[in-house]
Amino acid sequence: MQTNAFNIAGAILVCAVAATGAQDRGRTPSASESALRTRVQQYWARRQAKDLIGAYPFYCQAYRSKVSLNDYTRLTRLNRFDLSDVKVASIVQQHERYDVTITYRFVAPMITQERLDGQSTEAWKRDSNDQWCKEDEPALLPVPKGASGGSSAPVGQPSRPIAANPHRD
């Protein structure tokens, strides 16, 4: 019964965000982009509900073959913070994959009780079954190297303060 509530909440959120996103860009999204947006919102509805078992099938088969469901549900960074106002901010095609930027609000109790803004960019692509899937879950925490302005963030991963991106370790 709880899964049905997630599906209904996700569907309502998807419709609102899809309509708003297309209007913001001044164009009508393609059917493929709309399907991707819907899939991303379904995934994030589960993440927001801290339903990691429900979020796991949204990952590509290549990721799921390396990371078991049991190991995935132990990634505490994925449900460490209460998320709200989750939105798809942009979808940018990068050859065979799409970079999807998500914005959200969260509370980091060890820092402040106020809601903070967060953002994440993640790669999505079509899996072998033609279903949209999230490519992976980064394993490393981006940590600034120091005052020099350099970053030890993994290649292709933005360097952000820890509080600005709470779903990463």
Image (spheres, rainbow, N blue to C red):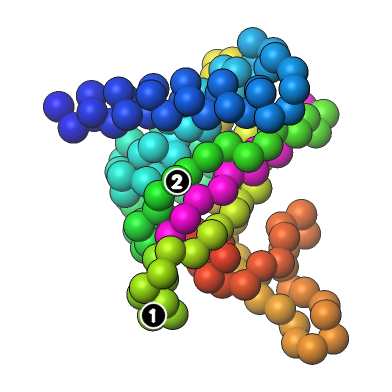
Task: Please identify the quarter of the rendering in which residue 97 is found.
Answer: top right
Frontmost residue, 39 versus 109? 109
Residue at 23% x, 28% y is 5
The residue to which callout 1 is attached is 110
Q: Secondary structure at mark 2?
A: strand
Span of residues in magenta: 96-106
Q: Is residue 79 visible?
A: yes
Q: Residue furthest left?
A: 1
Q: Is residue 109 above or below residue 6?
A: below
Residue 87 spot, x, y in % from top left = 53, 40
Residue at 39% x, 45% y is 47
Horizontal side of residue 121 vs 113, given as left or right: right
Q: Magenta region's main secondary structure?
A: strand
Q: CA distance from mark 2 to mark 1?
A: 21 Å
Frontmost residue, 53 versus 8? 8
Horizontal side of residue 141 vs 29, given as left or right: left
The residue to which callout 2 is attached is 85
